[in-house]
């Protein structure tokens, strides 16, 4: 079984069916079609607030274009040092923002902690034009190490941002997994907690290729749309991005898919623990970080499992990622073969 990444998964039947239905006729380009015009209303209903939605085809574009609207070219973005924007987006943030600097800090399981964030910001020495002033805080939900911020934790970070007059951005590549774990309304852990914008991930959780920039401050739409065009991420056949997103959130497909991935991760964690492995921290989303002997890792690979080592957490730590289509029954059958 392939636990290398949720990016290896196909797109789900609901998305495929929607794309097939919308594939047979002409429509206006660049978002002028009837399907694209439904996005704002659909996501406003989802978040129980008027929002502006700007879809793009990649998570990197969603993150970096969002940040370009929240921070100036000479400003700073406070983030966790394990965050995707710091470790995996190359120099994308600086490129899209025109020069903004990432200001990484530490925290357990790749989470920022409100009190330490407040101290980090307050203790920075202001050297005027010679230094970089924080303008935005970026958090990831769920984090790159599979942990989930509670509603209260996001609220406390939002309070810190308001105290220091900073914007708050949420990288939501696995937002569905976080909400499925929390069993909360998506509004409670976003705009009600002080989040200004989120990259609403879909590609990892059943879409073909789309993430949505969701703006809780709708005044940011023009700036984000200009940045999207300038960066080459405005699709001419925009309707096929919109089609994926509408199918993804219709009838809570996004949560159903995430719930399967989360359940599969917990099932796998239980089996691995019986084999002598241990989690570096509790499984909350669809990523497991597992400490185990090399011998056990070899047996798992011999049994047909694909997964990656994670040396940043230790030479004996490995990452397993489940997905919307992971077969839980097949995971259970693995136990007898180990």
Image: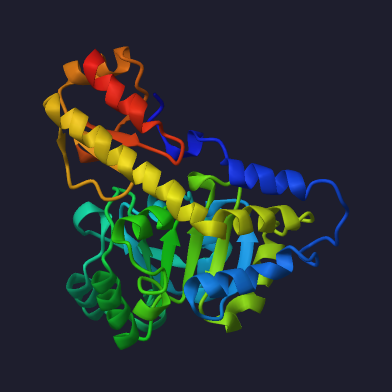
Q: Give residue 290's quadrant in the image.
A: top left
Front position in the image: 99 or 294:
294
Residue at (29, 77) in percent of width and height: 155
Residue at (60, 69) in percent of width and height: 42
Does residue 328 appear to the left or right of 256 in the view shown? left
**303, above or below 325, in the image:** above
**189, above or below 274, in the image:** below
Colour convention of the picture: rainbow
* Residue 251 spot, x, y in % from top left: 53, 58
**178, above or below 291, in the image:** below
* Residue 326 spot, x, y in % from top left: 41, 34
Does residue 331 appear to the left or right of 59 in the view shown? left
Q: Give residue 127's quadrant in the image.
A: bottom left
Front position in the image: 151 or 319:
151
Quadrant assignment for the C terminus: top left
**275, above or below 6, in the image:** above
Q: How many marks?
A: 0
Residue at (74, 63) in percent of width and height: 35
* Residue 223 spot, x, y in % from top left: 63, 76
In the rendered image, is residue 311 in sight?
Answer: no
* Residue 242 spot, x, y in % from top left: 67, 59
Quadrant assignment for the N terminus: top left
In the rendered image, is residue 324 in sight?
Answer: yes
Does residue 298 appear to the left or right of 17 in the view shown? left
Residue at (69, 69) in percent of width and height: 38
């Amino acid at each position: 079984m392939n636990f290398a990444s949720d990016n290896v998964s196909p797109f789900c039947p609901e998305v495929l069916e929607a794309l097939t239905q919308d594939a047979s006729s002409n429509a206006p380009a660049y978002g002028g079609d009837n399907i694209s015009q439904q996005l704002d209303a659909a996501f406003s209903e989802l978040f129980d607030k008027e929002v502006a939605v700007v879809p793009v085809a990649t998570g990197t574009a969603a993150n970096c274009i969002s940040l370009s609207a929240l921070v100036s070219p000479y400003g700073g973005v406070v983030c966790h040092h394990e965050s995707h924007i710091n470790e995996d987006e190359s120099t994308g943030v600086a490129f899209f923002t025109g020069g903004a600097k990432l200001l990484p800090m530490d925290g357990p399981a790749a989470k920022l902690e409100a009190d330490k964030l407040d101290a980090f910001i307050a203790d920075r020495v202001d050297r005027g034009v010679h230094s970089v002033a924080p303008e935005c805080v970026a958090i990831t939900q769920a984090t790159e190490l599979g942990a989930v911020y509670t509603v209260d934790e996001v609220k406390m970070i939002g309070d810190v941002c308001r105290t220091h007059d900073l914007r708050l951005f949420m990288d939501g590549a696995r937002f569905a997994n976080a909400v499925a774990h929390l069993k909360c309304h998506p509004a409670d852990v976003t705009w009600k907690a002080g989040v200004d914008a989120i990259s609403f991930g879909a590609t990892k959780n059943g879409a073909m290729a789309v993430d949505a920039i969701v703006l809780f401050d709708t005044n940011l739409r023009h700036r984000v749309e200009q940045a999207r065009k300038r960066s080459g991420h405005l699709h001419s056949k925009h309707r096929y991005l919109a089609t994926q997103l509408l199918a993804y959130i219709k009838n809570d497909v996004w949560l159903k898919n995430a719930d399967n991935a989360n359940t599969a991760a917990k099932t796998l964690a239980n089996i691995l623990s019986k084999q002598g492995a241990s989690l570096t921290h509790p499984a909350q989303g669809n990523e497991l970080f597992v400490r185990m002997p090399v011998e056990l890792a070899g047996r798992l690979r011999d049994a047909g499992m694909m997964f990656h080592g994670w040396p940043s957490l230790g030479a004996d730590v490995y990452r397993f990622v489940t997905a919307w289509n992971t077969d839980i029954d097949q995971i259970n059958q693995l136990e007898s073969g180990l």
